[in-house]
Image (cartoon, rainbow, N blue to C red):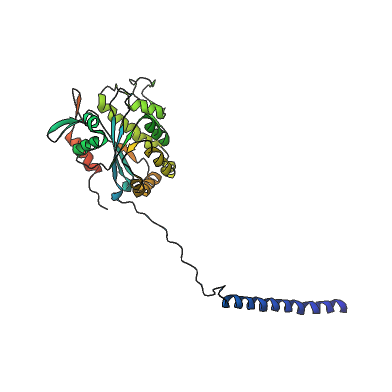
């Protein structure tokens, strides 16, 4: 028993000595490192980097004239206005019949003739005069680029009228892929002519936006923009995109059923379409009125 007690009495002082040695050596090392500036004992924790918060305002509003021009089809070019109001998470599409007429510089002119003679800029000027608005940008699409846009959005379920040939429709909703959408909106034999084709195109595009996955569209917005802008004739620039990118992504991610379409009412007179002035005024008042913050 005395031998066991002797061993314990030696071990305890030994452990105490080792512990004190660690403290002494560690303290000396810390002093030397601090003395030579390797450790800054008075350094404070850095402040976290502030988050960048971008606010969507009505300055993010923009208007684009889309022109679908497929010379191989039997119909005229398709003209559609898109008014975007990201702050209100609102998109509106308005098809403008190609045979719309108005007075420009004292002379009667049609949208189709203006576009044929002067191209995209002439079509923009025509619609600016008709609606008394300012269109920011235009984008001219052909069949391939329009089909690509429809693929990006993901197609649409839409009730194709029974009289439209080539769809086997009974008037109820059916899913249309990109190629079918292209054939549908360029169908040249609608009962009410260009006016019906114009608002049908706007309804199809609006429904396609609402049926798409907004979060998916927002996540792939950079790639989609680069793909489409390189396939089209447009005056939309990378600077334009960067300026409104955050606002558009926020609208897509956080909006619900953001899209609607507007029917431009008017009168068919032989080969011409005369828009109703009250309808034009209503469109301008609802979507171009000066909004306050």
**Total labels drawn:** 0
Q: Indicate the position of residue 237 as horizontal and vertical percent values.
A: 34, 44
Report which quarter residue 170 is drawn in: top left
Q: Nearer the viewer, residue 72 or 285?
A: 72
Report which quarter residue 119 is drawn in: top left
Q: Nearer the viewer, residue 235 or 15?
A: 235
Q: Indicate the position of residue 54 as horizontal and vertical percent values.
A: 36, 54
Q: Is residue 271 left or right of residue 207?
A: left
Point 38% across, 44% down: residue:
252
Q: Residue furthest left?
A: 106
Point 37% across, 49% down: residue:
246
Q: Is residue 208 left or right of residue 267?
A: right
Point 37% across, 37% down: residue:
209
Q: Judge whether 106 appears above or below 75 on screen.
A: below
Q: Quadrant of the N terminus?
A: bottom right
Q: Indicate the position of residue 251 as horizontal and vertical percent values.
A: 36, 46
Q: Indicate the position of residue 242 as horizontal and vertical percent values.
A: 36, 48
Residue 159 appears in the figure = no
Residue 184 appears in the figure = yes
């Amino acid at each position: 028993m005395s031998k066991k007690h002797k061993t314990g009495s030696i071990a305890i002082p030994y452990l105490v000595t080792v512990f004190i040695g660690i403290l002494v050596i560690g303290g000396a090392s810390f002093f030397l490192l601090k003395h030579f500036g390797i450790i800054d004992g008075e350094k404070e924790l850095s402040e976290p980097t502030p988050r960048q918060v971008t606010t969507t305002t009505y300055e993010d509003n923009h208007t684009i004239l889309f022109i679908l021009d497929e010379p191989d089809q039997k119909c005229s070019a398709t003209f559609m206005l898109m008014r975007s109001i990201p702050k209100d998470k609102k998109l509106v599409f308005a098809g403008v019949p190609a045979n719309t007429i108005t007075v420009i510089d004292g002379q009667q002119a049609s949208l189709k003739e203006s576009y044929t003679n002067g191209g995209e800029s002439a079509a923009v000027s025509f619609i600016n005069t008709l609606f008394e608005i300012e269109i920011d940008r235009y984008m001219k699409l052909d069949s391939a680029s329009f089909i690509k846009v429809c693929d990006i959005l993901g197609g649409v379920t839409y009730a194709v009228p029974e009289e439209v040939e080539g769809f086997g429709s009974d008037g109820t909703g059916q899913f249309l892929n990109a190629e079918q959408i292209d054939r549908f909106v360029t169908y040249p034999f609608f009962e009410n002519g260009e006016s019906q084709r114009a608002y049908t195109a706007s309804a199809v595009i609006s429904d396609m936006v609402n049926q798409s996955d907004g979060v998916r569209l927002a996540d792939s917005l950079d790639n989609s923009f680069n793909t489409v802008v390189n396939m089209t004739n447009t005056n939309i620039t990378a600077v334009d995109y960067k300026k409104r990118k955050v606002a558009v992504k926020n609208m897509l991610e956080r909006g619900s059923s953001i899209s609607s379409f507007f029917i431009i009412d008017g009168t068919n007179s032989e080969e011409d379409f005369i828009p109703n002035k009250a309808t034009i005024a209503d469109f301008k008042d609802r979507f171009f009125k000066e909004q306050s913050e």
